[in-house]
Structures are given as C-alpha cells and as structure tokens.
Amino acid sequence: MLKLQYPICCGVDVHKNLIVATIVTTDSKGVSEYEQKSFSTINSDIQKLHDWLIEHNCYHVCMESTGKYWIPIFNYLETDIDVCLTHPKYVKAIKGKKTDKKDSRWIADLYKFD
C-alpha cells in the first residue's frame, strides 16, 4: 500500500488562459475530500490562487510543465509554497473523457503519495 506523504496538497492543471486547481485533504483514516476552483492566468488571479491555497493550509502543489504557461504560476507560488513541477508523461491520466477538472484531481491524487 502506498504511504501518504502530503495530507493536504494541490494538483494544478495549467493552460494558456485557465488554471484549474484541486486541493485534496486526506484524514488519518485515508478518506479524501476535494475542493476545486478555477482561475484565469492574469496576475491578480494567480494571487487569488496563492491566497486560496494559503487559506486552506495547502503548502504543497504539483503542476505539469505544459509549454511555457506554468512559469508565471511557478514563480509566484514558489516564495511561500513548495511547488513540484512534473513532466506531463508522468501524470498522464487514463484514456477516456478527459477534462481539466479530472486532470487536476488526478495530479492531486498522485502527488499526495509523492
């Protein structure tokens, strides 16, 4: 069985104009609760993402390195938050009806086990 590394963490799916973030909170019994929110990629919304993460005590974030769109988000978050950047091939979801929300949740689920 996989060992839980981050009881509170976030998976972020980044696109040119949209950021989808999912915070997963896992209790001592292994039950996970998810909270999801979308942000635009303008600076004021990146700040709202940062504030939302801090508000939820989420200091561990994982995001895909999609093109160049991850750079401003990474640069803004890295001052207060541990940001893990991963190659898309390592967090690729199972084939099917993919959505940004599902991808964000999948990244969060993978990252909570490191």
Image (spheres, rainbow, N blue to C red):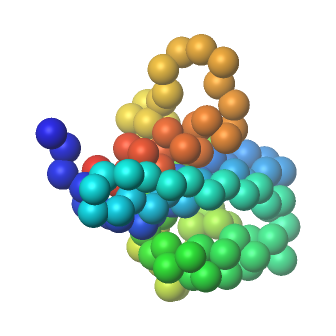
Name the residue at 67% across, 81% down.
Answer: 51
**Horizontal side, residue 44 vs residue 56: left or right:** right
Residue extending furthest toward the top = 96
**Horizontal side, residue 11 vs residue 98: left or right:** left
Locate residue 101: give its quadrant.
top right
**Horizontal side, residue 46 vs residue 113: left or right:** right
Name the residue at 49% across, 39% down.
Answer: 106
Residue extending furthest toward the left = 1
Q: Quadrant of the N terminus?
A: top left
Q: Nearer the viewer, residue 28 or 17?
A: 28
Name the residue at 35% across, 62% down.
Answer: 27
Q: As displayed, is residue 40 above or below residue 82?
A: above
Locate residue 29: give its quadrant.
bottom left
Q: Nearer the viewer, residue 12 or 56?
A: 56
Counting from the top left corner in percent of width and height, residue 15 is at: 73, 46
Q: Is residue 1 visible?
A: yes
Locate residue 21: give its quadrant.
bottom right
Q: As displayed, is residue 76 above or below residue 40?
A: below
Counting from the top left corner in percent of width and height, residue 90 is at: 39, 35
Number of numbered labels in the structure image: 0
Name the residue at 27% across, 63% down.
Answer: 28
Counting from the top left corner in percent of width and height, residue 38 is at: 76, 56
Q: Can residue 70 be seen in this view?
A: no
Q: As displayed, is residue 36 above or below residue 53?
A: above
